[in-house]
């Protein structure tokens, strides 16, 4: 019996690895490159589930990928964040990021209430819109006690909308009365994923791209305090309902430590070879893609259509309003 469980565990991890690698390779193709490797991995896993069904014999390995590997990827994601640069050069952007995140979450909540959309998915996508897409959704999902299916649906919505908006930004950029630096800030403060920001800002030049990434990273920085705020509110709400307290997401400590390591050790005292850092970045992307594959396997088509349409409408509205708000702020 133990051998069967071990086999299912190993084959489950290998299965998510194969689909993740395939998804990352497909994401290099002309059209799919706009969607990105994470969304491509989710789509492949989703299609597999609809055609062949859920591979129950590999459940333990798939769950390991969707939970443990996802947390490991978020910890490594901290190496992308330079706290020192944000605090020294991006204080204005930090203040604007607070407005962006607050607006995204509050308006998502209000609209979801108004049209009676699925609240869990709406809040997950609201956080993803305000902070940093899939990574933010993955970080807050355990705090909000979200199902894997809800997490996967939310990431899929973010990937689709972020891609559409980044392409729209590229087409709009030549016609907007904005300097390249202003355009970079606009993209960095309003678009969903780090990849979407890079995609939209790159055509405007090096300075625009640098400012866009700095603005985006200021939003990533705020993921840490946001998680603690959500923990506080969830525990208050659940204590009233006499429900078991939510566990503390300890992987966030790893995220913070990696951010500190990148900001104050690697940047000042220890220089890591560029190839090593690129390798770590590739491993982070692979782990995230494996986690997305595992999450995608949990999506049921009928449930997705029924539950995702209203949250999609909510976040489409929020994204449009956010683009206008940031444009006015800049």
Image (spheres, rainbow, N blue to C red):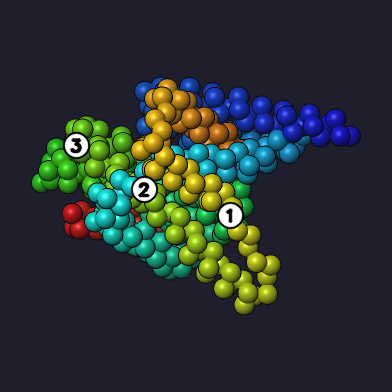
Picture coordinates of residue 115, whole percent (x, y): 44, 65
Picture coordinates of residue 223, whole percent (x, y): 43, 54
Q: Residues within 10 Å of mark 3 (few under 14, many from 20)?
A: some
Image quadrant holding the C terminus, namely bottom left
Labels 3 and 1: the sequence-earlier one: 3
The residue mark sitting in front, 2 or 3, is: 2
Labels 1 and 2: the sequence-earlier one: 2
**Which quadrant of the view contains residue 264?**
top left
- Seen from the viewer's position, the closer of residues 283 and 31 is 283
**Which quadrant of the view contains residue 242?**
bottom right
Q: Tell me the number on the disc at residue 249.
A: 1
Residue under the image location 48 percent in, 49 percent down: 256
Picture coordinates of residue 107, whole percent (x, y): 37, 64
Residue under the image location 25 percent in, 33 percent down: 202
Give the residue at the far right of this rendering. Answer: 1
Q: Tell me the number on the disc at residue 87.
A: none
């Amino acid at each position: 019996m133990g051998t069967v469980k071990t086999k299912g565990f190993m084959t489950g991890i290998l299965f998510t690895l194969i689909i993740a690698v395939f998804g990352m390779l497909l994401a290099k193709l002309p059209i799919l490159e706009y969607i990105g490797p994470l969304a491509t991995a989710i789509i492949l896993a989703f299609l597999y589930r609809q055609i062949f069904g859920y591979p129950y014999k590999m459940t333990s390995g798939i769950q390991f990928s969707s939970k443990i590997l996802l947390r490991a990827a978020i910890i490594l994601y901290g190496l992308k964040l330079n706290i020192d640069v944000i605090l020294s050069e991006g204080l204005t952007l930090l203040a604007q990021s607070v407005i962006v995140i607050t607006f995204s979450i509050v308006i998502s909540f209000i609209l979801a209430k108004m049209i009676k959309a699925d609240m869990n998915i709406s809040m997950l996508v609201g956080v993803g819109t305000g902070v940093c897409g899939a990574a933010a959704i993955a970080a807050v999902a355990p705090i909000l006690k979200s199902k894997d299916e809800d997490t996967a649906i939310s990431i899929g919505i973010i990937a689709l909308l972020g891609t559409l908006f980044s392409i729209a930004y590229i087409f709009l950029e030549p016609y907007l009365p904005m300097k390249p630096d202003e355009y970079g800030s606009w993209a960095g403060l309003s678009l969903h994923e780090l990849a979407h920001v890079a995609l939209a800002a790159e055509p405007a030049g090096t300075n625009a791209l640098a400012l866009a990434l700095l603005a985006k990273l200021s939003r990533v920085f705020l993921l840490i305090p946001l998680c603690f705020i959500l923990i506080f509110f969830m525990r208050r709400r659940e204590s009233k309902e006499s429900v078991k307290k939510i566990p503390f997401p300890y992987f966030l400590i790893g995220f913070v430590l990696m951010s500190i390591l990148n900001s104050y050790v690697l940047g000042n005292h220890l220089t890591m070879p560029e190839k090593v850092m690129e390798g770590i970045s590739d491993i982070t992307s692979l782990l995230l893609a494996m986690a997305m594959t595992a999450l995608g396997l949990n999506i049921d088509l009928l449930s997705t259509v029924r539950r995702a349409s209203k949250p999609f409408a909510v976040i489409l509205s929020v994204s449009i309003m956010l683009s206008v708000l940031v444009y006015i702020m800049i």
